[in-house]
Image (spheres, helix red, strand yellow):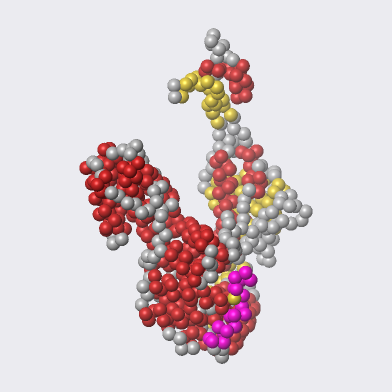
Amino acid sequence: MTETLLIEIGLEELPARFVRASSEQLTERITRYLTENCIHFGAVHTFATPRRLAVQIKDVADQQEDIVENAKGPAKKIAQDADGNWTKAAQGFARGQGVSTDVLYFETIKDVEYVYAKKEIKGIKAIEVIKSIPDVIKEMNFPVTMHWGASAFEFIRPVHWFVVMMGDQVVPCSFLGVESGNLSQGHRFLGEAATIVHADDYASTLKEQFVIADLEERKEMIIKQFSALEAANNWIIPQDNTLLEEVVSLVEYPTAFAGEYDARYLDLPEEVLITSMKAHQRYFEATDKSGKLLPHFIGVRNGDANHLQNVVLGNQKVLTARLEDGLFFYEEDKRTSIASSVEKLASVSFHAKIGSLAEKMENTAQLSSYLAEMIEMETEQKENLQRAASIYKFDLVSNMVSEFPELQGVMGEKYALMAGEKPEVAAAIREHYLPLSSEGDVPQSVVGSVLAVADKLDSVISFFKQGMIPTGSNDPYALRRQTIGIVQIIEANNWSFSFKELLEVALENIYGLKDAAQIEGLVEAITSFTKSRVLQKLQSYHISHDIQEAILHAENDDILMSIHYAQALAAHQADEDYKMVVEALARVVNISHKEVAPYTVASELLETASEKNLYVQGNHLATIWNQATIEEAYQALRDLTPYITAYFEENMVMVDNATVKQNRLATLARISQHILQVADVRKLITK
């Protein structure tokens, strides 16, 4: 027989951003627990609201499946004596397995016979297994937790009720001091306590108490209500899936409503209006068919349509107050010059151990200049970059950004254009914050891209210089995010340059370091940290782990080339000759990687035809290497394979004659240096 299993954890309000993930984690842990305990089940349905996490599992077997195990014991020579009698070792093994020696038998593994016992484990009632589910729930992990009362145990929020049912029966157990039952709770204001008569009735019972327990059902309700508002008013409500997901996780019974605000607030930049609505009030904006913003907003109430007009008026009042503040700040900021704002940055701390925002801008400006030279930036672009770098943080002291931090950069662009700055300069002020996430948009302009890299790199260098380096999951200054941003921008702009060279010049000339060992240590630390972010980028391209490792250990500090070399190796991984190529190249590296440049080869010491051929091919490789494309570089190494194979078949490198031996090592090392620029091929896995 089968029954429906229902588990519901009633909680104080969860943060909206954790609702869906927490419910999915609960479902995953419960279903895995049932599977591990050999309890068969059917369809699984996840539920979640701000006040509850629940999972409903259909067709749960009422008993564990019987298990037959073949337990392996000692080898036959230990299990039986010379006369074929069971030894104490075999008897002890049988007792441990709960069987008699009569059922022991032998199986051969790799020419050795071992004693085995077949034992049958009778499945227990499913309800006995389910009683331990609270222990499974305790293993859940969350980004934030709290404890309450006298308990030291931490959970995402305090637990107020706990439902565990198989069909119409309550499974007796407790979670954090709350006994299981069949009593749930309806909507905090509209509903009442809800008795779940049968596990199948969960969603319908809660719906009677104004709780739509299914996240997707609530989302569909909101979308339909938005569509009705659009049709009735001839509006467009722009799609925002992130905000929609948040709103869905904020309510248990959604009812959409529309409000309005004074049209005079449309004089504010659209970004200010939308930020006021979305980020602060969780409203959606309304536009006309052409995309022009209208003086209306759309919210979602956690409740029904009763007294909805009062809700609308209250929300209008709140939004009007915020927009009034925004309008005041905007008018005040327009009276302030960029120069005076920049002066204020000298008294604003970037970090107590690093310096002011003005000092950060100075460092960034110098880094920008070095980078501009390395990527061969055009003269006009350099001029725009220099201007942008000298003012790009000015909006941080504006009234608007102080009130709406989300608008940093955005308001900088607006105010810069109003002050007569070039569009390229203004755009760079906004773009230098990009990308905002590992998959976010990168700057579209070259000026903005250089400024963004320089600003992020200054942060990384400054914190590393003070020893404030991310460890484990601890990254309070978001240096990982900033570094992956550097990698993204470099790749998007196809910039090829020596990252180590940029760091060395910067540390000595901008950050005032003179100790060679300190510079070398910081360069190595920052380069290694950056390479790890390159691997993160390679993971997003689904490049295999062995190629990632090979790239990580390559003797190459060009970020763009590292990505391209990884992609080239991945593209050839399925080639028939890939194994042969990698093994040949790895043999060269293995035997010569300890050699130190310069690699001087005396041609008169070359003895065999294969030795001379490899020397000639090595010269050719060196000639074409710097001008070769990524694919041409791989093909050049690939073409070396038969020469390498012939070389090792005909020549011994480690001969007694020290001069010949060194000459042969130098021949291989000249090739190895190019191989290692691509990847440490010894890390590659071939089948």
- In terms of depth relative to the viewer, which is nearer, 498 or 330? 498
Extreme-top residue of the structure:
83
Decide whether residue 124 is among the magenta residues: no
Q: Is residue 516 above or below residue 383?
A: above
- In terms of depth relative to the viewer, which is nearer, 631 or 679? 679
Count numbered badges in the picture: 0
One can see residue 624 in this view: yes
- The residue lying at 59 percent from left, 76 percent from top is 356
Extreme-bottom residue of the structure:
335
- The residue lying at 62 percent from left, 55 percent from top is 142
Q: Is residue 284 above or below residue 8?
A: below
Rendering quarter of residue 63:
top right
- The residue lying at 48 percent from left, 69 percent from top is 506
Where does residue 104 sit, x and y in percent of width and height? Answer: 54, 19
Where does residue 548 sit, x and y in percent of width and height? Answer: 42, 52
Q: Is residue 550 above or below residue 327?
A: above
- The residue lying at 58 percent from left, 47 percent from top is 29
Where does residue 4 sit, x and y in percent of width and height? Answer: 58, 45
One can see residue 178 in this view: no
**Quarter in which the N terminus is drawn:** top right
Where does residue 187 sit, x and y in percent of width and height? Answer: 66, 63
Please give the range of residues in magenta. Answer: 338-355
Extreme-right residue of the structure:
150
**Quarter in which the C terminus is drawn:** top left
Decide whether residue 349 is among the magenta residues: yes
Q: Is residue 377 above or below residue 497?
A: below
Extreme-left residue of the structure:
609
- In terms of depth relative to the viewer, which is nearer, 358 or 46? 358
